[in-house]
Amino acid sequence: MSQEARKLPYGDGRDALLAAVLDVVAEKGLRGATYRSVATRAGVNHALVTHHFGSMEGLLAATMEWSVQRSIEETGLSGIADFDGNFADTLIATVSAEPELQLFQFEMILESRRNPRIREMVERLYANYVSTVEEALARRGLDTRNEASLAIFAALDGLMLQFLTISDPDRIRAAVIQVGRLISALEATNGTAHNPPACDDSLGYDHGRTAQRDDRGP
């Protein structure tokens, strides 16, 4: 083990391994994530994988939880119910800055078809994301019993997969904005519509014309 690796504090060594998993999987796929490849990328002795996580599977599980939490925080997913024009820009900018976060999760999703233990991790991943969206919708009084939160997250998830593979940022941004319109439609359906936060014109809201229609009545 190098002199530099021996000097790494506990937290740095653990976090370095988590970050290294993201890099290795994004570059080589999940099957490229071995004790040695991850430790080498982290700049630590591979024995630290066992020390901190017990096994490679334990490291993958910890990385999954870590990556999901970071994704939720950095994309602002918990504020999706207060959708405005900045949400699409923040989401795309975050995924662009750290594509490894999403690429790792997509690799785990694919592997879950072959590995039941990874499937359990993926189920927790989706449960975490969907519950975050559901809680955000519930805070605005929206009825989520018809799996609206699952539909909204699935739309965003698929769009980010396209963004990382096919790309075309302008079309993806426009499609994310359409997801915001779905939330507005939910409000109208549930009878809970209220004045949304200020947003840019790209969302297509026309509050003036809406008000005029309301004044004229049915």
Image (cartoon, grey):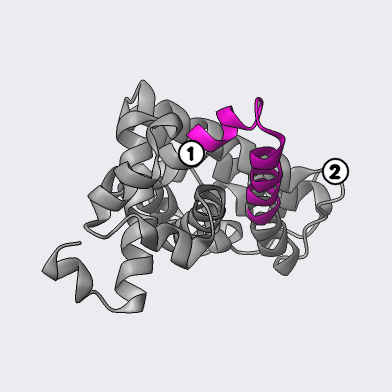
Amino acid type, callout 1: Val
Kindly identify which residue carries mark 2.
146
- Above or below residue 21? Residue 192 is below
Q: Residue at x 71, y 69 (%)?
A: 139
**Label 1: element kind:** helix
- Tag of residue 176: 1
Front one among 24 and 38: 38
Q: Is residue 114 magenta?
A: yes
Q: Position of residue 7 (x, y in %)?
A: 19, 76
Q: Earlier in the sequence, mark 2 or mark 1?
A: 2
Q: Residue furthest top?
A: 166
Q: Position of residue 118 (x, y in %)?
A: 64, 40
Q: Residue at x 48, y 55 (%)?
A: 63
The quarter of the picture where the C terminus appears is top right
Q: Residue at x 44, y 56 (%)?
A: 75
Q: Quadrant of residue 92?
A: top left
Amino acid type, callout 2: Asn
Label 2: how many Cα within 10 Å (few below 14, some 14–19, many 20+): few
Q: State how far apart marks 2 and 1 are (Cα).
A: 21 Å
- Above or below residue 111? Residue 68 is below
Q: Residue furthest right?
A: 145
Q: Main secondary structure of the magenta part?
A: helix
- Above or below residue 7? Residue 151 is above
Q: Position of residue 81 (x, y in %)?
A: 61, 58
The span shown in magenta is 106-128
Q: Residue at x 50, y 49 (%)?
A: 56
Q: Looking at the image, can residue 95 be seen?
A: no
